């Protein structure tokens, strides 16, 4: 999630960078007379003064949208000199300081804008709340940093006779099958395309940037080699991973990247638990599941609902398939995209009963602002899916030293991400936690990705141990499941399988996190 909205060319029809989701002309750019009066523009001065103010705001917005925060700040301050009590100027200047990580100054400016507008502009109220929340997250991140420092300095390992093994926890890692050629990818991206193509071409955008991610002991594997998945399962089992959740790409009867799971089903190998996640969003050229430059469109109908569930029933019958209360576990990535989810899930259940199969235990991802779909969508539970829901990002300029002029992007503190997720109140509905080792999708979006800074196996282990502890106290449907995003999302810098930099450290963190010290104290209570 970014604070300042999508970056695009400035204009009155562009999205306002304040994050409201409205077009600029209907938000911070609406400088009609009734908006200007009382905001520092003297009566009778709506000619040249208004024009100058408008031009300054347009220039500042352009700089902001291009991540040139220093120039944006300069221009907003000129606008503030012209109109000292202008709520829009104060608000946008506060947004800039927030993007620079200057929380105290950002809060004072946006609070002043809130007072001037008397709470009548939702985007200002929203961003003020966001700044204040971020200040709390930053405080909690400092606590986590101190805990990491303390653990590094302790003389004895945590496992030295003072820990208990939490055997009841299931760690399920999402698995991307895009490591073999398919005709569609050859046509769309060039002959021989697999995920490794993106991974290998990544470059550093700033000093200290961990790119490219180089494959470790498994090499740049091809899933056409049936031994690869077997070796991956052996590694996962060795380090306490309980199963894989394979992304399942199904579009009105058309499947993509289905070969690994088909072979898994046909061969019976590896002997390792697994489940499926229906990745039910459009395939687009932007790698975002959006509606621009759609390559394969996802459609929905009652007939499609029946065909879909029939396609996965063979997996449901497999003895290795993961179950919750004897029901096959079915993950859904974009429940919000299904027009009538209750009817869809009802069809799934009916078809399963008709085929003498327990109906699926449907778990919806908490993604893209989705809340929960238990009452409204008919799902049985929700799963957390970071990086969705991470704390607000900041821009490259002014915080990091860029290595080339095209580098822009947005950045998130990994420790602040941990703090935000751990501080969430426990929901009043069935909910499975999720975790990521890191995130950096610049391999796909070279100059404009989202990158987490300061991630490490040690920080990942601290986060995971806290989740293990909490899950041990509060099962869901008699299960203690934690979802790891991901086993092998290499182009998103999000993988726990070995790489050259860390070796098996991420896997070791998974195994170590199951060791709960006697007398363990939670980092901080959710909701605090």
Image (cartoon, helix red, strand yellow):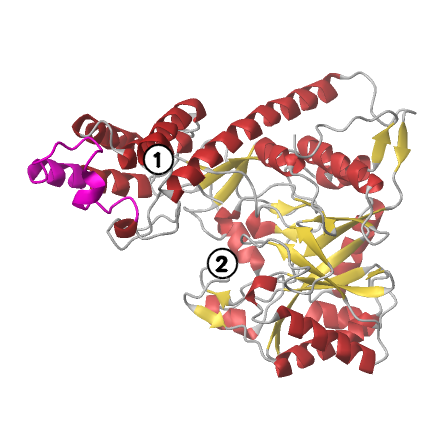
Q: Is residue 401 in sight in this rendering? A: no
Question: Image check: 448 left or right of 45?
Answer: right
The crowding category of the residue bearing disc 1, from other C-alpha atoms within 10 Å (few below 14, some 14 to 19, many at least 20), is: few
Residue 118 - label: 1
The mark lying in front, picked from 1 and 2, is: 1
In terms of image quadrants, where is residue 245?
bottom right
What x and y, as percent, mark residue 240?
A: 83, 45
Which residue has dot 2 on it? 288
Horizontal side of 252 relative to 79 (left or right) equals: right
Give the number of the disc on residue 502.
none
Q: Quadrant of residue 162?
A: top right
Say few, some or many: other residues with alpha carbon within 10 Å of mark 2 (under 14 / 14 to 19 / 20 or more): few
Q: Looking at the image, is 369 positioned above or below residue 362?
A: above
Q: Report if residue 44 is visible in the image.
A: yes
Whichever of labels 1 and 2 marks the residue nearer the N terminus, that label is 1
- The percent coordinates of residue 524 (x first, y second) are 70, 28
Magenta run includes residue 43: yes
- The span picked out in magenta is 27-55
Residue drawn at x 35%, y 42% as measured from the top left: 121
* Relative image position of residue 324 (x, y in whole percent): 83, 59
What residue is rendered at 27% in x and 41% in y?
61
Counting every numbered tag in the picture gives 2
Q: Which secondary structure, mark 2?
A: loop
């Amino acid at each position: 999630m970014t604070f300042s909205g999508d970056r695009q060319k400035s204009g009155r029809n562009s999205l306002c960078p304040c994050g409201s989701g409205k077009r600029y002309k209907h938000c911070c750019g609406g400088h009609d007379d009734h908006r200007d009066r009382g905001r520092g523009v003297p009566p009778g001065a709506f000619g040249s003064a208004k024009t100058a103010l408008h031009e300054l705001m347009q220039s500042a917005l352009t700089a902001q949208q291009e991540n040139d925060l220093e120039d944006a700040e300069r221009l907003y301050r000129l606008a503030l000199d012209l109109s000292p009590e202008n709520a829009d100027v104060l608000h946008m200047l506060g947004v800039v300081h927030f993007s620079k990580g200057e929380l105290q100054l950002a809060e004072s400016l946006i609070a002043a804008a809130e007072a001037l507008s008397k709470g009548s502009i939702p985007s200002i109220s929203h961003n003020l709340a966001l700044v204040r929340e971020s200040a709390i997250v930053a405080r909690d991140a400092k606590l986590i940093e101190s805990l990491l420092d303390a653990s590094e300095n302790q003389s004895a390992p945590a496992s030295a006779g003072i820990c208990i093994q939490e055997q009841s926890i299931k760690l399920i890692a999402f698995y991307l099958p895009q490591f073999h050629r398919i005709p569609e990818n050859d046509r769309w991206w060039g002959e021989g395309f697999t995920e490794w193509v993106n991974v290998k071409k990544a470059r550093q955008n700033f000093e200290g940037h961990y790119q490219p991610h180089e494959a470790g002991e498994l090499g740049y594997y091809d899933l056409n080699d049936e031994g690869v998945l077997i070796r991956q399962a052996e590694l996962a089992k060795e380090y306490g991973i309980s199963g894989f959740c394979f992304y399942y790409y199904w579009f009105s009867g058309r499947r993509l990247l289905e070969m690994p799971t088909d072979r898994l089903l046909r061969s019976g190998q590896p002997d390792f638990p697994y489940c499926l996640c229906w990745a039910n969003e459009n395939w687009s050229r932007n790698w975002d599941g959006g509606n621009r430059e759609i390559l394969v469109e996802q459609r929905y109908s009652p007939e499609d609902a029946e065909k879909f569930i029939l396609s996965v029933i063979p997996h449901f019958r497999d003895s290795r398939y993961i179950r919750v209360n004897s029901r096959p576990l079915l993950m859904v990535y974009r429940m919000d995209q299904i027009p009538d989810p209750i009817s869809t899930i009802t069809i799934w259940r009916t078809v399963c009963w008709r085929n003498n199969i327990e109906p699926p235990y449907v778990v919806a991802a908490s993604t893209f602002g989705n809340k929960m779909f238990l009452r409204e969508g008919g799902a049985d539970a929700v799963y957390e899916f970071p990086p969705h829901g991470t704390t607000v990002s900041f821009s490259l300029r002014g915080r990091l030293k860029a290595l080339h002029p095209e580098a822009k992007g947005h950045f998130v503190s990994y420790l602040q991400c941990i703090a935000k997720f751990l501080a969430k109140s426990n929901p009043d509905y069935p909910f499975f936690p999720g975790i990521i080792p890191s995130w950096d999708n610049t391999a796909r979006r070279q100059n404009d990705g989202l990158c987490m800074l300061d991630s490490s196996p040690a920080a990942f282990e601290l986060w995971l141990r806290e989740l293990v502890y909490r899950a041990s106290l509060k099962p869901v449907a008699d299960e203690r499941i934690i979802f790891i995003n991901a086993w092998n999302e290499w182009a998103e810098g999000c993988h726990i399988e070995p790489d050259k930099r860390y070796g098996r450290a991420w896997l070791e963190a998974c195994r170590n996190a199951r060791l709960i010290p006697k007398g363990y104290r939670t980092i901080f209570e959710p909701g605090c």
